[in-house]
Image: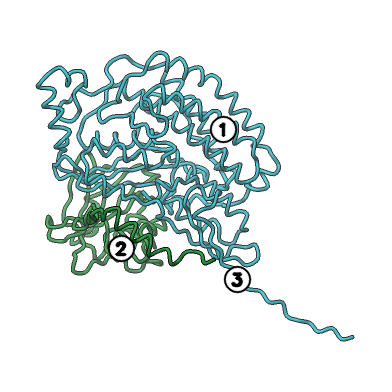
Chain colours: A cyan, B green
Amino acid sequence: MEQIEKPFETRELSISMGPQHPATHGVLRLALNLDGETVIKCTPHVGYLHRGIEKLGEDRTYFSALPLTDRLDYISSMNNNVGYVNAVEKLFGIEAPERAKFIRTMVAEMGRISSHIIWLGTHVLDIGATTPFLYAFRERERILDLFETLCGARLTVSYPRIGGVRNDVSQEFLDELYEFVLEFPARMDDYETLVTENRVWKKRTVGIGVISSEDAVNWGLTGGMLRGSGVNYDVRKHALYDAYGRVEFDVPLGKNGDCYDRYLVRIGEMRQANRIIKQCIEKLPTGHVMADSPKFTLPPKDMVLKDMEHLIHHFVLITKGPGAPEGEIYSATEVPKGELGFYFVSDGAGKPYRMKVRAPSFVHASILPKLCEGGLVADVIANIGTIDIVLGECDR
Amino acid sequence: MEPLQIAEKIREKFPDEVLDVKEFREQVAVTLKKDRILEICRYLHDDSDLCFDYLVDLCGVDYFGKKEKRFEVVYHLYSIQRCHAIRLKAAVAESSPEIDSVTAVWAGANWHERECYDMFGIIFKGHPDMRRVLMPEDWEGHPLRKDYPVKGPEKEWLGFGAVLERAKRFKEFDWQE
């Protein structure tokens, strides 16, 4: 019998991954073109969560735009608030008191731990390890509980204020936080035992999604994405905002720029964040937590209820907004995802003329095609996890 | 290098291009003509003293009715090696909202420029993929322009009767027995 050879027919397969997909961490849609298991083309589509925060910010006074920033990177809202108030203070030319600066540094680092820990949990869950996810949420819960004791809110905190923070920390809060800080390194050891030397984990991350240091800088990556490639750039060290000039911490760096190195960098960052919180509690100075500059900060609430002058002052500031000096500033802070920048153009009114949010997630999402193309479709999941994006911040 | 020195250096190299240098809160903004922006950016990136290797941000600003040329494209540059920063601003007129893309210098400009096109309608010449990024592809208008309303038109509530009437009409698409 004669065998007839039939040519094998192959064709490219286009699939749409997301916007409803548990591993895309939100509403990210990737249009993938596959040849077998290899990704030929990857096109990210973002914007599903676009709420026009910049446009809204231009329509509100500087005070009332603060809660909008909670909704940028909603798992580390504290850091966004700190970034926002730092930028506005720079524009106004006022400075928060020392105590407020230390408190801000402290809560920002708490936000960093809670954000990194959720990243760790979900990233390893995507790749197949279920256990660390459960432990990660236990630690995150403690931080959220602490936020609740501090300001009453767990996620959308709006705790920092222009010129300081909303209320002083209580001794009870500090004691609880200190207890957490002492326990946390042991918890980190637990995670590392589960993950760091795990063979499956290493197989899935070492050498995956490699970015060279030149590319990382050229693409404008920041945060763990940049430092995983070995570039030493941390806004906390370069700009020394808040109390970062007065606490000691190291900047963990990677070597190879792959998913595994970025994992190590973020693990290191959590340990450093813990170190910063500890120093902040120990060095916390006494004094006020709001700047004394009546032109730009709201009067104390109890005085508003008692005193006519304060009531008028409050009314004018709330309705007209604080009259910012004319000019433009860009101010950046290091949030868990990378460099969060605010660019304000002020025309002298109580609202910003232009508010631009430089979101790290937006930049990091743009590098996905470079990471994914040529790799396997399974590694797309690892790459989405490693860039650590939050779509609320990406889409704004 | 001090920001004002950087501005001077740009002025020396491109005397006809620099329109204005402004300092505010120790940050220096250099206003430029838009025509040779790519060349200037290339120079800032490659020069060994300046070495602006990191494009922090690129965005548009709409000065509707405030300035002669309506738009400005703002570049925030930083040098990770030299630790200095500068802000460039290029004025773009509404009649020809076009400017050269800087993606050839910084790959990271790609999505920033797409966003700027999306929000202001400024077209970046030489951009590899000039599409909207945040708004849907068929969206009309550019939301961050100052003449774009914050709120949509408010529709009046039709009343409960009208809603029931409408629901009846949609019944025809219901599952047939």
Letter of the chain that mark 2 sits on in the rendering = B
Letter of the chain that mark 3 sits on in the rendering = A
Q: Which mark is residue A136?
A: 1
Q: Residue at x 39, y 59 (%)?
A: B110
Instruction: Please identify, in this view, whether the residue under mark 2 or under mark 3 is nearer the observer.
Output: 3
Q: Residue at x 17, y 47 (%)?
A: B22
Q: Secondary structure at mark 2?
A: helix
So how many labels did they put on this image? 3
Residue marked by disc 2: B39
The amino acid beneath tag 2 is: Glu
The amino acid beneath tag 1 is: Ala
Query: Is A176 or A280 nearer to us in this picture?
Result: A176
- Residue A152 in the image, given as x and y percentages of width and height: 38, 25
- Residue B95 in the image, given as x and y percentages of width and height: 18, 69
Tell me if residue B12 can be seen.
no
Instruction: Please identify, in this view, whether the residue under mark 2 or under mark 1 is nearer the observer.
Output: 1
State the separation of the CA atoms marked 2 and 1. 49 Å
